[in-house]
Amino acid sequence: MKSSFLRAGLALLSGVILSACGGSNGSLALSGSVNYNGATSSTVVLTNKSNSDKLTLTIAPGSNTFVFGKLLATDEKFDVVVETLPVGATCTSTEASGTASYYTVYRVAITCTANPFTLGGTVKGLTATGLVLANGSDTTAVLPSATAGADVSFKFPTKVANTALYGVTVLSQPAGQTCTVNSALNPGTMPSADQLGLVVNCASN
Amino acid sequence: MKFSFVSAAAALTMMAVLAGCGGKQQYTVQGTILNLNNAGLVLTNNGGNDLTVPTGATSFAFSQQIDYGTTYNVAVKTQPAHMTCGWNTTNIGSAGYNVSIQMTLACDQNAYGLGGQITGLTAGADGKARTLTLTNGSTSTLVLSSDSATSGALDFVFGSTVADGQAYGVVAVDGNNGLACTVANGTGVMHEVAVSNIKVTCVPK
């Protein structure tokens, strides 16, 4: 007699708990981590496309954890995407989609990389030493090829933020030559990829 | 009997401790230094005992120790080349107030403004304001508006300064608004004084 009362009570209690979990009758909290290598805190917006649950997250440099507000039922599909990237960064994710179970819902891992892209290009006609190119405060010295006048490639040491402006100038001319940066791609906005298409033309004075 | 032994021992210990605080105690006036990358830093204590601190030093200690209760006042007599050092902690105190004297001096590379003058930044034929974006590589950007200009002329300074010894390279980003803008004196290395001679000239396309 006593135990059946208890059972009834338990059943009621579980009913209350489950109803508190919201629309999908779920009990699994979708969670994971965002790794960020930026120098200062930034903001990322995550969305579970399967149930339109959106999460705005302030991310500090290093590892950050997150938990979505809506709970998932067992076998409910989830698909977490980065809706808004941190400024200047790009993100990749692993185990961000699947079918909810105790083994899958806490494994979403997102990695956001600040300043992800390389700026560079080709110098044509360079025969002398002394050429220094600048992208603002970032500089790179370009030496002539062993085969005089052959194309030489260059890359700036500091990577550039996603969609940031860049503008390359000639900080120092090579001895006896004048180089100009072709304006076709310069200045420009960083595509969401490396920009290695800049052209610098050098001619003897 | 036992108790009196204990109190005798305690009295002895107390005396030993008190002797440790006595008038003969000497203190080294010392501290830590952050980010000292140039030579030339000279510190003084109470206006004397000049101490030249070498490049790269992370700490300093004056040769003359001071007695318990003596005040100390460490000051920067000469700043290092191209740097300005300031106190992160108090640099004045009395020996013996803490177990040891400790203070922190932090040094920063001097930085100067980057600017110049623009001409020809006029409103469009429709009377709407036109803007020009200047970018110092990917380091900093500045948007100028014809609204702020007088007859198209305007003095400008980038919002962020450039540290002594750092390169800069300013280029004009084509705003596709009917203006063709060129930059003169846009590239160089910041040294000792602010740059104010960048000339941006805009003409109708």
Image (cartoon, rainbow, N blue to C red):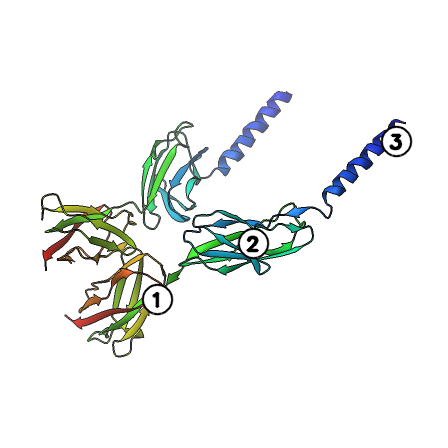
B78 or A51: nearer the viewer: B78
Could you tell me which chain the residue with mark 1 belongs to? B
Residue B92 spot, x, y in % from top left: 61, 57
Q: Is residue A35 visible?
A: yes
Residue B17: name its quadrant.
top right
Amino acid type at circle 2 is: Thr
Disc 3 from disc 1: Cα separation:
77 Å
The residue labelled by disc 1 is B194
The residue labelled by disc 2 is B89
Residue B163 spot, x, y in % from top left: 36, 58
Q: Is residue A109 above or below residue A163?
A: above
Amino acid type at circle 3 is: Ser
The residue labelled by disc 3 is B4
Of callouts 1 and 2, the N-terminal one: 2
- Given the current orientation, which residue lies at the most extreme right position? B1
Of callouts 3 and 1, the N-terminal one: 3
Q: Are the residues under marks 1 and 2 on the same chain?
A: yes
Could you tell me which chain the residue with mark 3 belongs to? B
A13 or A83: nearer the viewer: A83
Quadrant the C terminus of chain B occupies: bottom left
Quadrant the N terminus of chain B occupies: top right
* Secondary structure beneath label 1: loop
Q: Which mark is residue B140?
A: none
